[in-house]
Amino acid sequence: MTIILGIESSCDDTAAAVIQDGVLLSNIVSSQKVHESYGGVVPELASRAHQQNIIPVVDQALKKAGVKKEDISAVAFTRGPGLMGSLLVGTSFAKGFSTALGIPMVDVNHLHAHVLAHFIKESKEDGSQPGFPFLCLLVSGGNSQIVLVRSYKDMEIIGQTIDDAAGEAFDKCAKVMGLGYPGGPIVDRLAKEGNPDSFKLNKPHIQGYDYSFSGLKTSFLYLLRDELKKDPDFVEKNKADLCASLQKTIIEILMDKLRKAAKDLGIKEVAVAGGVSANSGLRTAFEDHAKRFGWKIYIPPFGYTTDNAAMVAMTGYFKYQDKEFCPVDAAPFSRVVLI
Ligand code: KG4
């Protein structure tokens, strides 16, 4: 029997999960509210909140799983990328835990874990996982990538953003409209009441499968600047239409490149991962592509799209089976390294 404790602390969610023989037993996430009034994550506050949360979160995960710490085979933790102060808390906890219990540590790449969230099983019978090779659109607050997944371990980033991430485009445009943080879910909600063809926004023209969202962000900013000169209530009056147009453009940018990659590589198994995959318009676009192009699509449940430790434990489980452990002096990394 293999039991893996997963720890996630890369940004502003403190999370712990337990997986037994590939099946999820518990998944606890404590989201930090302290950042809301700042309109974005404040790294130092995130780090301090992780320190307060980590022990209660792990305790809850073990209790919910009905597992004693002595039963755990290994501790898997997010080593990066992410905020250094936040990563240090999870990494230090994992080191203390593994040393105290004399069990191995497994380091996990956060992006790798988002992709492998598709393999989380809630029961032994759960069989809805992608077949290899598949394409995964990984869209979050810090990343927008198309990943070619050949196996649990063999992943290649074939396209990525050259500037902002899709989540950042949602969040920054929401911020200039005076909406709350994080902006993505708010834009998603308001877009449902708006006309997506009300405003025409810039789409990038770049080669290959790479993305760019900075031009869209600038064109959105200029639209508001020009219209607000004519009518100071422009945003208030057009909020839903602005959100619907913004969301439609972001989704079109994402899907155009993903469709091109799927066609060029002849791949029909297509998955989506990361926080932005919670977007209802993106989910509908995936369903539409499944019908039009015969794609077999994989959209994770909401709880596995945003940051969570179940995906870390799952990735740790695969690495544990291959005895891929990490030394106790392993340091976290903040920047994206090759998956
Ligand atoms: O993967 P994630 O939870 O965290 C990091 O990137 O660290 O992604 C967070 C991002 C934020 O930009 C947030 O606005 C976006 O995911 N997001 C959404 C939605 N829910 C979360 N964007 C659009 N529509 C949503 N429903």
Image (cartoon, grey):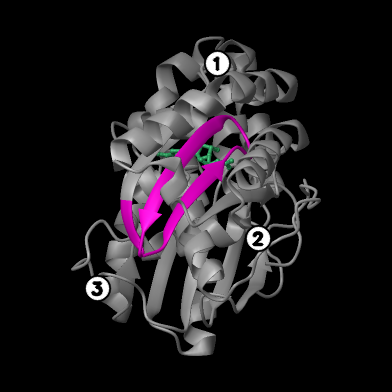
**Left or right of 112: which side holds 26?**
left
CA gap between label 3 and label 2 equals 25 Å
**Left or right of 146: which side holds 267?**
left
What residue is pinned by disc 1?
Answer: 36
Give the quadrant of the C terminus.
bottom right
Residue 291: numbered disc: 3
Q: Is residue 237 magenta?
A: no
Label 2 beta carbon within 8 A of ligand 1: no
Label 3 beta carbon within 8 A of ligand 1: no
Q: Confirm or deny contact between disc 1 and disc 2 (CB under 8 A).
A: no
What residue is pinned by disc 2?
Answer: 211
CA gap between label 3 and label 1 equals 39 Å
Amino acid type shown at disc 2: Tyr
Give, as a single range, the part of the protein colored magenta.
1-24
Q: Is residue 187 visible?
A: no
Amino acid type shown at disc 3: Lys
Question: Which residue lies at the image location 58% right of the left edge and 47% below the top edge?
Answer: 166
